[in-house]
Image (cartoon, grey):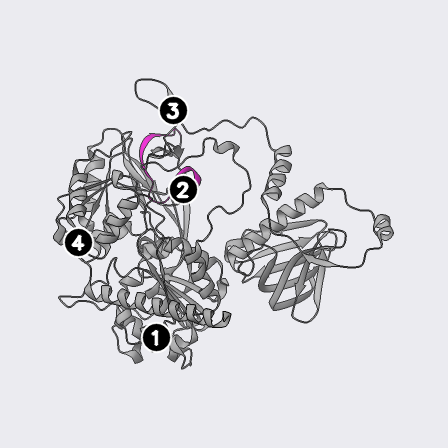
């Protein structure tokens, strides 16, 4: 179990304030590196213990208020009401803080529902003083908390069972669970528990990567499409202190998915094509320099699209501005991506060099790890097909299956297949033409941006457009995870069924997973250059008759049509095919085996990685055997 995974401990910055009657702080103590432990005393009362490394301070949590608005940023306030003391927590790994607050809230609620001992009973008990860390949340704690909440919950909640009507029959039937085109839908979302334990845990490979990260190692982890790289990356970000952790990616959309900024924005050196001295000067500008000096953990996603010269330039800049001779100036590097997917953009006819070909790569990266368990697809034959395409091997069997898929009818309930295109212009033209051909009035939804003057920067980072135009019958795609359990995930396909009457006229979207949902504007927040937080509030939708292969990276699509005739990059065919959840939801047009190509340099790099890993494993096994004898 990793530090803080039991929900009872935090490592963070703590400020303890004693307040007067008007709420002003009369005394303040700041502990930069504090240990916060949730526990129980000898009478099973809940105690908050704050340790500065010398003398622990204990606070009895009888009556309290929690302020959790900024918990995602690693901040919260615990206010002790009778004592008029508040404990301000900051720079705490967000995932740890979230679990800690959940544990505190549920355990405190359960304690309050039991009969507390009177002072007389405590004296008579004569128990020696004790303090024990609180036990981790169990399913029984969750059930008890939900029972207590239901006692005060309003009655008359409508039954929102997700059902579909079969055309012409009027019968209501549930979606089949084993149909691969549909995400599993809980039969009755209104009756699901208000609280629940985290459902999706890390597998062994992912846990090993997180462990290496938390030990402070510079790590590169890779894996084929659908192995949970993005999911793991979010867990890593949530496990590190926010003030010194910078999440970046090679593209704006990938950066938005992990709540970060682009690598170029973080670095502040433009394209990196200027001489090193000039790049160092650019990195020493006030806003940019603060990034470089405060950064202790730098995360880079979609590393396959970062060029080797740019990586080398960053490494040299880091050493210079941080005045350190250590690789990357002593910053811990957490690098993620699949070099067999999209390569760096070539300038002219010259082939761009991959990041692993950078002079500083081997000096910087200490640990290489690979995720092999595919989670996106479950059909083993389809997984094998994708693995063959990934490494550029197209057998007669693979060719036959992909050609055969062109005859599949994959449309359901008026939801057409999304066409994946190699070129952005084809996407825009297809979506505009199809929308214009639909009858009925156009509904226009304009985004609310935090800074309209920076609309170009927001456009580059945001997965949704500033203007969204919709009609009844428009093919759409969800651009954010809204409710994973009900199948409302990023990439979920649907069709606009109707619009609400009234001022806002929000769209009703019928999704492939069987859910019909009224979609409301959602908010995306991301960092721009200089550390400024920008946001966009907009419907979490995009038109989905067509989408570019570049923009589909990281998505899972239920119903997809692919034309590979104009594939122009190595890895592009694999990225396109691996978006599909299953072969039954995939239609490949004009398939030509010659478009499936893998870069020989990348294949050699991965071959060496696996060889090194096998040698390391063999030496570890031998070491363990020698210890036992």
Q: Nearer the viewer, residue 610 or 620?
A: 620
Name the residue located 19 percent from the left edge and 39 percent from the top edge.
405
Quadrant in the picture for the N terminus:
bottom right
From the viewer's side, name the closer residue of 491 and 73: 491
Of circles 4 and 1, the one toward us is: 4
Where is residue 309 drawn, in percent x and y?
A: 26, 72
What distance separates the C-alpha of mark 4 from that of mark 3? 41 Å
Secondary structure of the residue carrying tag 4 is loop
* Residue 265 in magenta stretch: no
The residue at which mark 3 appears reads as 173
Mark 2 or mark 3, earlier in chain: 3
Q: Which residue is at a point 59% across and 30% down the rendered structure image?
A: 154
Q: Residue at 28% across / 48% down in the picture?
A: 383
Disc 2 designates what residue?
A: 521
Quarter of the image for residue 49 reads bottom right
Mark closer to the chain start, 1 or 2: 1
User: Callout 2 environment at 10 Å: few (<14), some (14 to 19), or many (20+)?
Assistant: some
Q: Nearer the viewer, mark 1 or mark 3?
A: 3
In primary-sequence order, the first of circles 4 and 1 is 1
Using the numbered discs, state the Cα–Cα distance from disc 1 to disc 2 in whole angstroms.
40 Å
Residue holding disc 1: 315
* SS category of the residue bearing label 3: strand
The image shows residue 122, relative to residue 129, as above or below, that is above
| Mark 3 residue crowding within 10 angstroms, few (<14) / some (14–19) / many (20+) | few
Q: Are marks 4 and 1 in contact (CB under 8 Å)?
A: no
Tell me the number on the disc at residue 596. 4
């Amino acid at each position: 179990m990793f530090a803080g995974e039991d929900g009872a401990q935090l490592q963070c910055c703590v400020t303890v304030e004693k307040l007067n009657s008007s709420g002003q702080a009369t005394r303040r103590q700041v502990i930069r590196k504090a240990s916060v432990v949730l526990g129980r005393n000898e009478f099973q009362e809940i105690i908050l213990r704050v340790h500065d490394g010398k003398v622990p301070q204990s606070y009895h949590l009888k009556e309290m208020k929690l302020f959790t608005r900024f918990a995602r940023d690693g901040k919260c306030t615990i206010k002790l009401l009778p004592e008029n003391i508040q404990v301000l927590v900051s720079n705490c790994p967000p995932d740890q803080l979230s679990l800690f607050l959940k544990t505190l809230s549920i355990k405190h609620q359960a304690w309050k529902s039991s009969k507390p001992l009177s002072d007389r009973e405590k004296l008579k008990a004569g128990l020696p003083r004790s303090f024990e860390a609180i036990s981790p949340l169990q399913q029984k704690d969750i059930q008890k908390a939900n029972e207590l909440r239901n006692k005060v919950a309003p009655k008359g909640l409508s039954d929102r069972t997700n059902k579909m009507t079969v055309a012409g029959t009027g019968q209501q039937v549930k979606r089949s669970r084993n149909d691969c085109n549909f995400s599993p839908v809980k039969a009755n979302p209104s009756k699901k528990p208000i609280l629940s334990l985290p459902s999706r845990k890390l597998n062994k490979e992912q846990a090993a990567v997180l462990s290496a990260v938390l030990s402070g190692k510079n790590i590169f982890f890779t894996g084929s499409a659908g192995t949970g790289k993005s999911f793991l990356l979010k867990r890593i970000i949530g496990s590190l202190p926010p003030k010194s952790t910078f999440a970046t990616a090679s593209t704006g959309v990938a950066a938005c998915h992990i709540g970060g900024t682009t690598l170029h924005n973080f670095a502040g050196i433009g394209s990196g094509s200027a001489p090193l001295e000039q790049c160092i000067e650019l990195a020493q500008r006030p806003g940019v320099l603060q990034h470089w000096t405060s950064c202790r953990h730098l995360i880079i996603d979609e590393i396959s699209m970062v060029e080797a010269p740019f990586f080398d330039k960053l490494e040299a800049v880091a050493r210079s501005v941080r005045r350190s001779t250590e690789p990357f100036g002593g910053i811990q590097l957490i690098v993620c991506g699949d070099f067999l997917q999209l390569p760096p953009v070539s300038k002219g006819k010259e082939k761009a060099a991959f990041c692993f070909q950078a002079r500083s790569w081997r000096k910087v990266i200490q640990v290489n790890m690979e995720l092999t368990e595919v989670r996106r697809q479950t059909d083993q034959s389809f997984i094998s097909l994708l693995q063959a395409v990934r490494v550029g091997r197209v057998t007669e069997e693979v060719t036959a299956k992909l050609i055969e898929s062109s005859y599949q009818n994959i449309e359901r309930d008026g939801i057409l297949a999304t066409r994946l295109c190699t070129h952005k212009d084809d996407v825009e033209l297809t979506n505009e033409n199809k929308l214009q051909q639909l009858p009925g009035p156009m509904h226009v939804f304009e985004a609310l941006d935090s800074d309209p003057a920076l609309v170009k920067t927001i456009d580059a980072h945001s997965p949704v457009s500033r203007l969204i135009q919709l009609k009844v019958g428009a093919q759409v795609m969800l651009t954010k995870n809204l409710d994973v359990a009900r199948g409302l995930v990023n990439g979920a396909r649907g069709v606009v069924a109707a619009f609400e009457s009234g001022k806002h006229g929000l769209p009703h979207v019928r999704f492939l997973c069987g859910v019909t949902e009224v979609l409301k504007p959602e908010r995306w927040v991301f960092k721009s250059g200089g550390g400024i937080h920008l946001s966009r509030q907009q419907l979490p939708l995009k038109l989905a008759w067509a989408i570019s292969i570049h923009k589909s990276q990281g998505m899972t699509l239920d119903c997809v049509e692919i034309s590979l005739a104009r594939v122009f990059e190595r890895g592009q065919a694999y990225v396109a095919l691996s978006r599909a959840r299953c072969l039954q939801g995939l239609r490949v047009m004009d398939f030509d085996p010659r478009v499936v190509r893998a870069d020989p340099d990348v294949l050699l790099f991965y071959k060496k990685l696996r060889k090194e890993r096998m040698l390391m494993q063999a030496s570890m096994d031998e070491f363990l055997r020698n210890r036992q004898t």
